[in-house]
Image (spheres, rainbow, N blue to C red):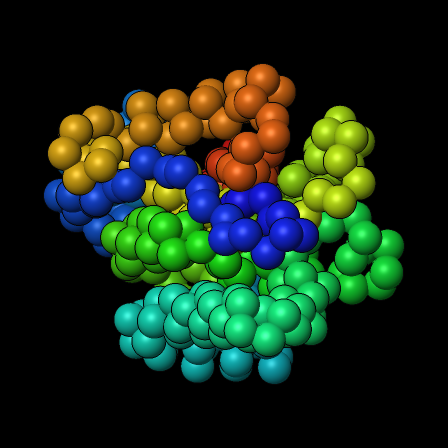
Amino acid sequence: MSLYRPSFARAFAYHASIKLQPPHSIIPSLHRSRVRLFTASTRSEVRPTYYQRRGSRGGRGGNSGPWGSYKARFDQIPSNWVLYGVMGANILVFCGWQYGHQVYARFRDASWLIALQNNFTTSWRNISSGRIWTIVTSCFSHEGTGHILVNMISLYFMASPVMAILGNTAFMSLYLFCGISSSVVSLLFNHFTGGNPSYSSHGASGAVYGVMTMFAAAYPRTTFLIFFVVPAPAWAVVSGLFLWDAYSSFNRRGGRTDSAGHVGGIAAGLLWFLRRVGRI
């Protein structure tokens, strides 16, 4: 995520570009006792029962009822279509920001940018005005070219293996849960500790970090290429990002990067994984 400035300057978030080298196998099948967070080998696989429906465990619903029918149909859609749909939504909102900047530059008409700020950024002003949908819509909003490129490249490489593990419905729940959690953490942290009444933020970084964290928790020794060059195990990359953003949240304020939102996204991805494997 990145901080939005009312001056309408383009936001830019600096992230580590990550290229995924797929694990030896993507379809899950490892025994529960061998799954160890940040220690399991990529030669092992996550057992499908970790990701089975609640109904198959005697829990609620399963595939029965309208939701189960919808879920079954949605999971039958090719995963690439779902991924391209998410990326397309982000690109569409990005184009809206670019159009708004052009209108403002040529005609000094800020109405388009104000509408985007009111509906696609997370801020205390928006929430207190009743625009609670912004905690979701901000997860699909990018103003800067570098910001959206890094997030969409990272999402492109990370989403496919995660969708192969979880399916379309669970992937979307992961994306939205991490994105919303990121928005809420960013909102609360910056409002109560930042002392910036004009603060607002947007970007898919929290959701992308959450997807990355879920994969790193399942396949911690898979190799990521930082900046497409430097190899590092997945657990080290995610741990490093978490520590850096946690440090930056308190000690590097005033920049363009919403570090608190990144921390929220990573934490949400880890919580989501632990919930899925029955640890919490």
Picture residue at 24% right of the left edge, 28% below the top? 233
Is residue 206 at least partly visible in the picture?
yes
Picture residue at 60% right of the left edge, 26% below the top? 253
Q: Is residue 18 above or below residue 85?
A: above
Q: Position of residue 74 (x, y in %)?
A: 44, 77
Q: Is residue 46 left or right of residue 93?
A: left
Residue 126's quadrant in the figure?
bottom right
Q: Position of residue 71 (x, y in %)?
A: 49, 74
Camera-nearest residue between 198 and 76: 198
Q: Is residue 72 left or right of residue 22?
A: right
Camera-nearest residue between 252 and 227: 252
Which corner quadrant holds the C terminus?
Answer: top right
Total count of labels: 0
Residue 254's quadrant in the figure?
top right
Picture residue at 67% right of the left edge, 52% below the top? 6
Q: Position of residue 266 (x, y in %)?
A: 49, 37
Residue 41's quadrant in the figure?
top left
Q: Is residue 270 above or below residue 206?
A: above
Q: Is residue 143 above or below residue 213?
A: below
Is residue 33 at least partly visible in the picture?
no
Q: Is residue 51 above or below residue 210?
A: below
Picture residue at 63% right of the left edge, 63% below the top? 120
Q: Position of residue 264 (x, y in %)?
A: 58, 37
